[in-house]
Amino acid sequence: MKKIILFFFITQACLSMDYFSELRGDYSLQNYKENYWYYKGIIGLQHEDENFYTEFSLIGEEGADPTVDLYRGYLEYYIDDITLSAGRQTISWGHGYIFNLSDVFNEIDIEDPKSDKRGLDSIRFKYSLSDMSRLEFIGFKTDAKDENFAGRYTFLIDNFEIMMNYFHITELSPLTKKIEKNERIVLEAKGDLIVGVWGQVSYDKYETDDLYTLVTGVDYNFNLYQKNIYTALEGLYNKKGGGAYLTYNLRINESFEFYQGCLVIDDGGYLNTTLNYIYNDYVNFEFAYNYYHNFEKYGYSTKDNKKLTSEIVFRTKMFF
């Protein structure tokens, strides 16, 4: 880790690179009696040229092991219709919020599903066949296995984007709750029919059994009393059960934003209510209330591993 930090400062001193950083501090009161603090900091460098882009950043967070780790570090190279990238980079496929069958690369943050994602060790190849179609291949590493593969073909039909995805991965099976090899095929579409619509159909071939899954979603953006409101609803169904997620975002003015998200899955439920105060371009303050019902099996518990039912969070974010 000392070598990584040394390389970080040498690169900054020797190359013409842009600097960026983010600081975050959370105070959480769980079940109205247990409280704790959480801190996170990201510092990085990035440089963009005519034929390439590179980024190198470190993350430090309270309670992490190691305390300081590589957040992103990759090089992206462009030549004609081909893009090549390698290193620890952010990869996000598919549409949707909580239920996204094409995003096998990231963990879902149910409080903020669209939050920034940590980098993934991978090699990526993209080739634009035309203005209307693209091929993409990724080899990547996960905690379960180093050798995973994903391929995608994307094309446009009128107002719809169609994606055909293939994954060869090792992951936790929802059928057996064990780590298994899986071959997944996902057919996906997103477009506009007065409201935004998207859908995914997947076939998973695990070592022990097969699984078919359907995801559908709609979203709509409108103005009410000169206030902008964005709403979205999505649902999932397979033989193991189903779930639904509803969210809306109300932009009160340039400084205040209010949003809620409600997730119901199997016999569990989650409700998030957040008020965001944008002080300026560099500082944001958030106040959030989270309610949990039977969510221990999804990994949500108090810091000392007790049942979590409610959580009040005060959060500060600073960007430089």
Image (spheres, grey):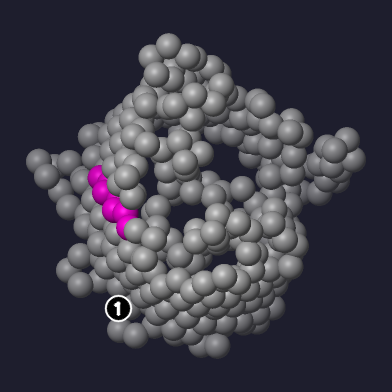
Q: Nearer the viewer, residue 26 or 192?
A: 26
Looking at the image, residue 160 lies above or below residue 294: below
Task: Residue 20: give x, y in percent of width and height.
Answer: 64, 39
Quarter location, residue 275: top left
Q: Quadrant of the N terminus?
A: top right
Residue 49 included in the magenta stretch of the image:
no
Q: Residue at x 17, y 41 (%)?
A: 227
Q: Residue at x 37, y 36 (%)?
A: 294
Q: Is residue 276 visible?
A: no
Task: Residue 289: give x, y in percent of width and height.
Answer: 34, 26
- Dominant SS type (magenta): strand
Quarter location, residue 212: bottom left
Q: Nearer the viewer, residue 3 or 104?
A: 104
Amino acid at dot 1? Asn
Quarter location, residue 78: bottom right
Q: Nearer the viewer, residue 166 or 306?
A: 306
Report the span colored magenta.
242-248
Residue most extreme to the top: 33
Q: Quadrant of the C terminus?
A: top right
Label 1: which secondary element: loop
- Residue located beneath label 1 in the image: 159
Q: Residue at x 49, y 74 (%)?
A: 210
Task: Residue 172: give x, y in percent of width and height.
Answer: 58, 57
Q: Residue at x 36, y 25 (%)?
A: 310
Q: From the viewer's perspective, is 31 left or right of 124?
A: left
Residue 245 included in the magenta stretch of the image:
yes
Q: Callout 1: few (<14), some (14-19), or many (20+) C-alpha neighbours within 10 Å?
A: few
Q: Is residue 93 visible?
A: yes
